[in-house]
Image (cartoon, coloured by chain):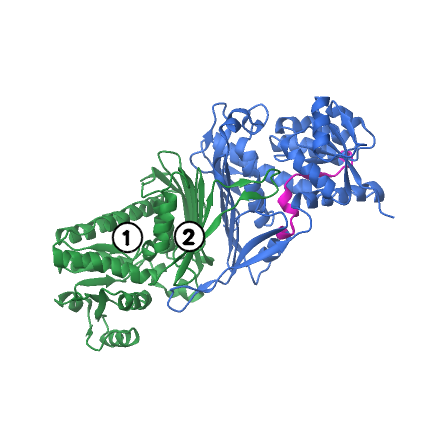
Chain colours: A blue, B green
Amino acid sequence: MAESPIQFGILGCADIARKVSRAITLAPNATLYAVGSRSLEKATRFAAANGFPPSAKIYGSYEAVLDDPDVDAVYVPLPTSLHLKWAVLAAEKKKHVLLEKPVALNVAELDQILEACESNGVQFMDGTMWMHHPRTAKMKEFLSDPQRFGQLKSVQSCFTFLAASDFHENNIRVKPDLDALGVLGDTGWYCIRAILFVADYELPKSVRALPGPVLNKTGVLKSCGASLIWEDGKVATFTCSFEANLTMSLTAVGTKGTLQVQDFVIPFKEDRAAFSAGIESWFNELVTGWRTMPSEHVVTTDLPQEALMVREFSGLVADIKRNGSKPEQKWPTLSRKTQLVLDAVKASIERGLEPVEV
Amino acid sequence: MAESPIQFGILGCADIARKVSRAITLAPNATLYAVGSRSLEKATRFAAANGFPPSAKIYGSYEAVLDDPDVDAVYVPLPTSLHLKWAVLAAEKKKHVLLEKPVALNVAELDQILEACESNGVQFMDGTMWMHHPRTAKMKEFLSDPQRFGQLKSVQSCFTFLAASDFHENNIRVKPDLDALGVLGDTGWYCIRAILFVADYELPKSVRALPGPVLNKTGVLKSCGASLIWEDGKVATFTCSFEANLTMSLTAVGTKGTLQVQDFVIPFKEDRAAFSAGIESWFNELVTGWRTMPSEHVVTTDLPQEALMVREFSGLVADIKRNGSKPEQKWPTLSRKTQLVLDAVKASIERGLEPVEV
């Protein structure tokens, strides 16, 4: 007998919640159960437009979602400044928490959220979807292979997009009271996570912001970057911006191999994603070309990465719910490391580009 | 009647001179005329192995090449520490100078070389071959197009290769008395040139070395990197190393477009080279994929880029020789700008990663 799916409640009707609603529908072990908004009308419209079943509960507040005993888990795509309050409250109501990134305004806030999840025995996971694409596992295989990739030496990452002018005026991601981390918490989050992923989640020793961070009129970051260095001397740099054409590139260079990806956060296509792997690359005899060139690896997927995220999360929730398992610590640990580096970059910017220990 | 080709003399028998000898043979307006080495036997072997015609002059010294009145131009692939002496002497002997990179140990030395070339009316060009590939012109078209690329915002470049252990022991590129700039003058030269190329040769305002430069036992750089910032706020970073798998990537992001290249210095294949151009890239409606993806542009070439370099140089030389034209200032100007940035990176490393004005 098939087990009943994990029942999701969604807090708010953010744009990104449309994508995740579809993902919940696509995931075989999850179902759209409730949505809450401060406006009942908005919640009703959202449910109708996003494939909620007729039986779904439509609430005029976030609290009501948390008070519904049949909600197993909540997806929280609220502005970052509201994460602390609502993620903690959700955990206290024994709801498992799928929290949009950036997870918190700083690691102190995140620690309160994680403490609430831990003490209430609920699973925590952040919304970094690309972690769940099978390409990511294939890239990890390559990066972990001493014969093909060797020892990591450097990483470069870039995630930018050109925000429309109304974004700069109105989007929550550039409002100091809503998403005070600006671009660093948005595209920068992904660059930092990608760098940590490549470094097998070893934290850097220190971080220094690159010159030229750009703030909007209210002091929120629109463009910035940083260099990171580890104990063993490997180095990473990243650039993130709301002011340049959509670009999401990742280059990781080891002693023996090179990984390159052009769409690491959101693959060009839903059903497949590629990466380039160079292995012991070298020139031809007269150095007029390459004898060994990078090769393209394509990884297909039956479900889009956001549905795989929901499936992974729901599987962990089901295991806790039905088997009394402990929450998986991997996911909160990755969120916390990402936030630690992000905080250090922010501190470096605030301290005039001084190096900051992580 | 076809004009007689420009007659080249080569100073020394460096490995790279094999590639350039072939390029001189391939270029329709150039011919291999002489080679000089401190060892006549070595020069004889070199000429025999590299397609020199039977009539070619084989000399047992560099001076003898410069004293041959029928040598129009010299190609100088000597260690960097010898460039000042031999490039100046060549210019004084009225030989046009094709000088391998890095052109000098610092800009003061380069200025002496350029002054000698200018006062003797000879053409100067450095050996940055990729400048002459037709792909480079196509990339420039894209980068210069306000509709397709817009305003440049950031550049990331990486050129690394894994040197064999005997390279670290014996290669001139890691000897303090021969190539004191180490990797910065070698692969770093190309990263800096690429960044300047993308920035339309506008010099950055300041430069700061990245953390973690690696020196060998004799104090020569094996790995390093830097961030560069311009008056208008655009930012670049690069990483160069002798200690990581062969990688040569360039990513330039403008407000409207993105340029990406994986083989910018030496194309994978001799007869064609590609770049990726993203233009007003954006997501599909639900942000589960890209609506507008980067496209691949392939540029074919009849001659390899090093032969195009020789052809370009020889054409300028012929114009001076036959028409009394002035030397083309573009090439020494580009060399000098590259050297200025390189010097600033070196100074930043020597000053504990402080920012250095360019």
Residue A135 in magenta stretch: yes
Quarter residue B209 falls in: top left
Residue A328 image position (x, y, % from top left): 73, 44
- Cα distance between the residues tagged 2 and 1: 18 Å
Q: What amino acid does circle 2 point to?
A: Cys
Residue A86 image position (x, y, % from top left): 70, 27
Classify mark 1: residues with Cα within 10 Å, few (<14), some (14-19) or many (20+): many
Tag shown at residue B105: 1
Circles 2 and 1: CB atoms closer than 8 Å: no
Q: Give the residues in magenta.
A: A119-136
Q: What amino acid does circle 1 point to?
A: Leu
| Camera-side residue of A4 and A183 | A4
| Left or right, B224 with reference to A23 | left
Chain letter behind tag 2: B
Residue A306 image position (x, y, % from top left): 67, 43
Residue B320 image position (x, y, % from top left): 15, 56
Q: Quadrant of the N terminus of chain B?
A: bottom left
Going 70% across and 39% down the picture, which residue do you hit?
A: A22
Question: Which residue lies under the disc numbered 2?
Answer: B240
